[in-house]
Amino acid sequence: MNTASPISPLRRQDIVEYEPLLKSSFKELLSFSSYSLMFPAVSPEELEPDAEHPYGKAVLEDDRLQLPLIRGDRLLAIFEARGVDAGKTAQALPYLPVMASLCLEQIGLRKLAITDPLTGLANRHCLHGALMREISGILGSIMPGPEAVADDSLQGHSACFGLIMIDLDRFRQVNESYGHLFGDRILNLAAEVLRDVCPKQALVCRLDGDSFGVLWPQASRSKLRDLASNLGIEMSKVTARFAPLREDVSVSASIGFVNYPQDLQGSQFQKAPAEQAWLVLEKAEKALNTAKACGRGQVYSFNQILTQGGVVLEVMPMNRLIINLGRSVDAHEGQRFLVWSRKFNGRETIVGASGDVVFGHYPPMYKAEVSLVEVQDEMAIAEILVQNDPDWVVEKGDKLTLLDEHSGLMEQREAQPGARSPQKDLLTGLYPYRDFLQTWQTARSQSKTFSVLLMRLESPHSERTPMDQMKEEQFFQALTNRAETLFGPSALGGRYSMNCVVYHVPDMEPSECARAVRELFEDERFAGLDKSVGIAGYPFLDFTRSDILDNARKAMDHAALLQDEKIACFDSISLNISADRLFAQGEVYDAIAEYKKALTADEGNLLARNSLGVCYARLNKYNSARAIFQDLAASHPDQIMPLYNFGCACLKDGDPEAARQAFEQVLAVKPDHIYALIRLGLMAEEEGDFERAWALYEQVGAAPAGDGQTPASSLAHRYLARLAFRRDDRDTARELLHQAITSNPQDAHSFHLLAKIYLERGDDPEIAESLARQSVHLKPDAPAFWEVLISALEQQGKAEEAGQTKIRAAAQTG
């Protein structure tokens, strides 16, 4: 059985990964102008350790020092420092190898602190840190606005990532039946599967016990699902031989996954990166728990929990249900679901009496439509709006499927003969939600103009006591008593949820309704409540009468983001907020439609116009984006980002001269705008003016990062390194490339160039292979990246693997 050493072993790849730490440690020991790392295939005799020099011997020639990096009697690498002070260094020469060993010990401790001792995978602490870094890098680009960048290729981070959680099924039984040492063997085999199957750029971790995590930068939902499904298949093949009984023991795995930013919404993006990292972990764990509840070997995404994972937990009196969906899976009041029986769901098979003949599937038949009226952290109370057949009752264990916002059946269903007439609640005088919808259908059709209000009133306590709920009922009763005075005798009121009321107010503009609400809140009885109000009016743009309730909900989302008075009338800003949410979820075309509506409502909405240009640019519609940014730059000369975005669109649209003028205008206003500096540097490179490009990139390194921009030094390393490579300054390029990779572990070009440098120098080709693999996994469509990987394999004599890689490269780039 493989067990981990208490002292973390170091590999040559670790020297590359921790090079910045190594450099800073040596900087404290001696002064040098430049350095390089060498990985010789054969250890030079003059540097080898002996009985008198167990840590090897340092060699000084003029101003060049060669220092061996030895760990466990093995030469890992040679640190060559240039420009040292020969006199001072000669005096310290006998002690430098010992100090180098202490530096390696520091690296070993650093690695041990983030590594699981049993499997050698990263640990939970390392995963949380990586999540924070990914989130911090993405936050600046997921929400459009006046500072949004049309071309995010310079920002140095992925636009999304995925987190997979894996839990071995019935692993406790393995430990109990075969012992913990055998269980550890299973865990190591599972860890090997994860290393083999997951992409090289993914961070694979052991979280605790039999749980593992995989962080995959730049992973879309479809790619993440494919990987999760593949992991489930491969995990089912994990088998270990229990020798005493000659028994083969197999396991399976339940898997849950979450995508960022698609699976976050609204105010969740306002949390600090550390808090968002915990939130992402919680969502992935929630998906994992749902998968485990569905049986062994299942794969579930966080998105599926709300759309397909609902289950009826209890059936209550008064047409109420308790379901398993709460705020933790982003459920909210007003959402509607279809209720299905376990049998008639379109998936269960019809088999013959003997059980060996399959005739087909039972037809999908829904039992009822329900709406959430109260949402708690882990569960919700739903009200039955429509029951398909009164004799076919909803039962504990029935499944739920989320309905789209405009696909509810309640409004489409005609009243049945003899059906119960809508009735108001005796205490509050409000209709239950089902009865309100039934009455509203008639009321809205009879009104040429009307407004709909959603008003949430709740106690500011995290845990509402029965007394709090009783007081809220009294508030709603007081509201009903004032409604006729405030909104007129024709106003129609109902319960949207337990703590939210809805009003249909005919012949009153939203602004008048807002004034009436403010007057209402002057009543001291409402002083102790958290209040948010969304108001939408009809007619508005091309929205239908039935759309206005959903518009009021969007207005209430708008109100929740306000700082003081949380009252919002549905307008251009409400549409902008809704579009931003769609953009963050990757629904770019839907976001475009919403931004256009926002501009129809208010042509002067700078946020919506710039965001629309960003959407067009992300879809490669550069001519449309260019026209938008040009108009914005002309009408808002005080705004820098539209001018920069105009330059990017011109560049992509094949007009470099217009792009150059735009970037120079940006620098005239803001001399340290790092993206404009980089763009001009890249253009100078293309023209062969390396000196000007170098000067511009150095300005990037000296510029402060602000306005959501990526740290300037990180970007400077990347572009200075590539330029140094083009200038054949390999040592400077190598040093800068390491710094660039440390700043941005997703920089495929830096991995590629670094692999090329190590391959050219004739160092250990394993290092070049490792770096080249990173580059092709990050950017598989680049032929040059595959060529370096194939060369690294051929130099190691791996002819068969090189041949297979050539076939793979042709498929990826062809």
Image (cartoon, rainbow, N blue to C red):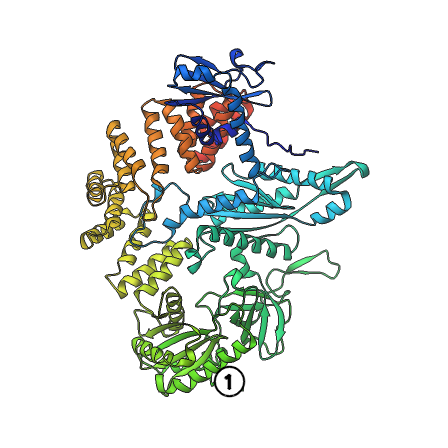
Q: Residue 632 appears at what percent x and percent y?
A: 22, 53
Residue 297 at what x, y percent from top left? 64, 50
Label 1, secondary structure: give it. loop
Residue sitting at the far right: 245
**Where is residue 395, by image quadrant?**
bottom right
Q: Which residue is drawn at 53% across and 15% down?
A: 43
Asked whether, in this view, residue 437 is left or right of residue 74, the answer is: left
Answer few, some or many: residues within 10 Å of disc 1's Cα (few below 14, many 20 plus, some between 14 and 19).
few
Residue ID at (55%, 47%): 164
Q: Could you say where residue 97 lies in the image, as x and y percent from the top left?
A: 52, 20
Residue 747 lies in what quarter of the image?
Answer: top left
Which residue sits at x=19%, y=41%? 661
At a point 49% along the width and 66% down the height, the residue shown is: 332
- Residue 431, placed above or below residue 690: below
Q: Is residue 814 visible?
A: no
* 539 to 698, vertically: above or below: below
Against 789, residue 491 (above or below) is below
Q: Confirm whether residue 605 shows in the render.
A: yes
The front one of 133 and 438 is 133
| Quarter of the rendering occupied by the C terminus | top left
Q: Nearer the viewer, residue 505 or 558?
A: 558
Amino acid type at circle 1 is: Asp
Q: Name the residue tied to disc 1.
A: 425
> Position of 471 compared to 158: left or right?
right
